[in-house]
Image (cartoon, rainbow, N blue to C red):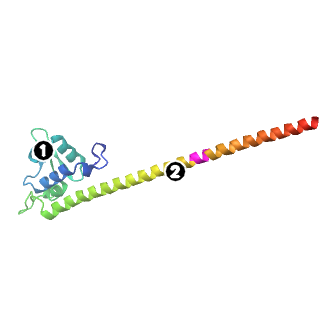
């Protein structure tokens, strides 16, 4: 989903709340959290938290259940995937239903993914700006060539008109001389 409200660089534009949410949901002792509580705990506007959680569906999982207040619960997909019940398996004796927070290497991998996406967005933006500049230069060159071509066509047309007038005058002069 990612294209949050038409943003061409969503990972860059939402970097701070994205990193905070991934880190918090990966490291919290709670299985999942609701948007109002996340917003309060992380000190981000609730609307921004909602945009990020709903916009980055590849990172965040929304539960099918809601809280008493009607809010969905969210967690990161990697953490949810580690739950035995998410894979359809019944917990076995000795299994921990909630494996707990992700370890540092898993959190680091998620943050590296976000960082890579920011770099990719910046490179794409740089390439688009370079392409735009090259296109503008091409348009200026075409316009200059068109102006030069227009001048050449105008000059050729004027020369042709002058040659035609000269031929008419010469023919008229020859005719007048032959009459005299």
Q: Do the residues labelled 1 and 2 touch (CB within 8 Å)?
A: no
* Element type where label 1 sits in the image: helix
User: Where's residue 4, x and y in %?
Assistant: 27, 45
- In this rendering, is residue 164 above or below 113? above
* Helix, strand or loop for the magenta stretch, by majority: helix
Horizontal side of 145 relative to 41 (left or right) equals right
The residue to which callout 2 is attached is 141
Q: Which residue is drawn at 44% across and 53% down?
A: 134
Q: Which residue is drawn at 12% across and 42% down?
A: 36
* Element type where label 2 sits in the image: helix
Q: Which mark is residue 110?
A: none
On whether residue 114 falls in the magenta region, the answer is no
- Comparing 92 with 117, the one in front is 117
User: Where's residue 162, x and y in %?
Assistant: 74, 41
On whether residue 148 falls in the magenta region, the answer is yes
Q: Quadrant of residue 40?
A: top left
Give the residues drawn in magenta, as a range: 146-150
- Comparing 5 with 74, the one in front is 5
Which dot, 1 or 2, sits closer to the camera? 2
Q: In which quarter of the image is residue 166?
A: top right
User: Where's residue 39, x and y in %?
Assistant: 12, 44
Q: Residue at x 28, y 42 (%)?
A: 5
Q: Which of marks 1 and 2 is nearer the N terminus?
A: 1
Give the Cα distance between marks 1 and 2: 53 Å
Q: Please tell me how crowded label 1 is: few (under 14), some (14-19), or many (20+) other residues with Cα within 10 Å.
A: some
Horizontal side of 148 relative to 123 (left or right) equals right
Report the residue that reaches farthest toward the bottom: 105
The residue to which callout 1 is attached is 39
Q: In which quarter of the image is the C terminus?
A: top right
User: Where's residue 150, x and y in %?
Assistant: 61, 44
């Amino acid at each position: 989903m990612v294209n949050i409200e038409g943003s061409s660089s969503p990972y860059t534009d939402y970097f701070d709340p994205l990193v905070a949410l991934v880190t918090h949901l990966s490291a919290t002792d709670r299985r999942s959290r609701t948007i109002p509580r996340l917003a309060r705990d992380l000190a981000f506007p609730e609307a921004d938290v909602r945009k990020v959680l709903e916009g980055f569906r590849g990172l965040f999982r929304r539960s099918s259940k809601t809280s008493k207040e009607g809010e969905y619960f969210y967690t990161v997909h990697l953490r949810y995937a580690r739950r035995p019940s998410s894979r359809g398996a019944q917990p076995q004796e000795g299994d921990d239903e909630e494996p707990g927070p992700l370890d540092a290497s898993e959190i680091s991998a998620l943050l590296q993914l976000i960082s890579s996406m920011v770099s990719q967005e910046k490179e794409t933006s740089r390439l688009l700006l370079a392409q735009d500049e090259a296109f503008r230069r091409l348009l200026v060159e075409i316009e200059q060539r068109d102006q030069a071509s227009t001048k050449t066509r105008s000059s050729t047309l004027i020369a042709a008109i002058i040659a035609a007038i000269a031929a008419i005058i010469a023919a008229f002069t020859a005719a007048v001389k032959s009459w005299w």
